[in-house]
Image (cartoon, grey):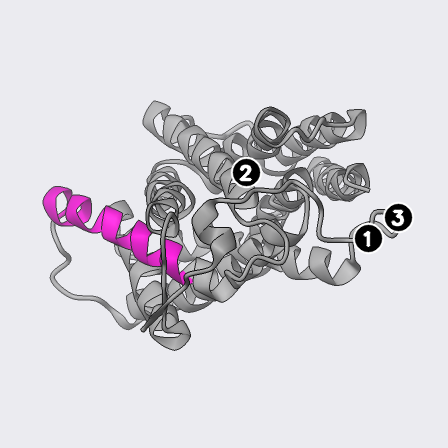
Amino acid sequence: MKTNGSTTASAGVTSAAPAYPASGGLPLRDILLTGLAPAIWGSTYLVTSQWLPPGQPLLSGVIRALPAGLLMLAWGRTLPAGSWWWRAAVLGVLNIGFFQAMLFIAAYRLPGGVAATVGAIQPLIVVVLAWAWLGARPRTTAWLAGVGGLLGVALLVLGPAARLDAIGVAAAAAGAASMAVGTVLTRRWQPPHSPQSPLVLTAWQLCAGGLFLLPFALALEPLPGHFTLANWLGYGWLSIVGAGVTYALWFRGVGRMPSSAVSALGLLSPVSATVLGFLVLGQALTAVQAVGALLVLASVWLGQRAAN
């Protein structure tokens, strides 16, 4: 394997300058490709509840991240160099390892709606962190997009029978905060035109995150006696598509778009989860949920406008 010895990467040059025309706004292609990632992530709650073995949040995180990361690393054949060794480790823990653990703990302990609502605080956290670390002073529309998205997700997925679990809520909030920090740091450490491609950056982080989770999974969770065909199909979807493909698209967007615009696209995940529940599980879609979905989509649009 080769190492990436770029002067830019080794010296740690950072930049908050956007990789898009200042007068032309965000390219539609970047918005659509980046938004595809959270739309696919919306299937996580459905796959976890229907196809994965019960009570295995840490193991599920390892299987989702590590195999895809190793395959992508073998394909890209590029190892980190210089400061990217520790940067990849930090980003891998924040964006993958710790986040996946918290995501699956929340998915196992909470209804998807409650977990998605708590996770919707991420755009607001990103706005604050991007302001503090990148000097990206947020516009009023960015705040409105964050608050509107949170309210829309609540209308979309919360119901009178929503069950709260303190550990599940704390895990969902911790996961949202971890991914928010990771998103802003990825933007800070991945300036436009950096030689680190989305594929390479994704491979490093998936491997680092999976290796971080592995000892905790082995120590804290008993291994299942066997995996069913449904388990293998679920893990295959979450690893190949739900991790390898989607994280490459996500980190591509992080490198090209402002952090606030990327995080606003994350609100598409609960919309996708609700639509899948309606189509696959036959769950009802009420008028209030329809209003919530429209509010979320409006907030996503507003989040992109705030970056122009």
Whether the residues at callouts 1 and 3 have beta carbons within 8 Å, the answer is yes
Residue at the limit of the structure toward the bottom, as seen here? 75
Residue 176 pos. (x, y %): 48, 35
At 70% from the left edge and 43% from the top edge, which residue is drawn?
17
**What amino acid does circle 2 point to?**
Val
Q: CA distance from mark 1 to mark 3?
A: 5 Å
- Give the side of residue 135 with respect to residue 306, left or right: left
**Main SS of residues in magenta:** helix
Confirm whether residue 137 shows in the render.
Answer: yes
Q: Is residue 219 above or below residue 200?
A: above
- Residue 208 in magenta stretch: yes
Dividing the picture into quadrants, the one containing residue 166 is: top left
Residue receiving disc 2: 184
- Give the side of residue 204 with respect to residue 307, left or right: left
Which quadrant does the N terminus fall into? Answer: bottom left
Residue 135 pos. (x, y %): 65, 28
First of labels 2, 3 by sequence position: 3
At 38% from the left edge and 64% from the top edge, which residue is drawn?
239
Judge the density around disc 2: few (<14), some (14-19), many (≥20) Cα neighbours within 10 Å.
many
**What amino acid does circle 3 point to?**
Ser
Element type at marker 3? loop
226 vs 9, nearest the viewer:
9
Residue receiving disc 3: 23
Confirm whether residue 281 shows in the render.
Answer: no
- Residue 161 in magenta stretch: no
**Callout count:** 3
Residue receiving disc 1: 21
260 vs 296, nearest the viewer:
260
Residue 284 pos. (x, y %): 61, 47
Element type at marker 1? loop
Q: Is residue 148 above or below residue 248?
A: above
What range is drawn magenta here? Answer: 203-221
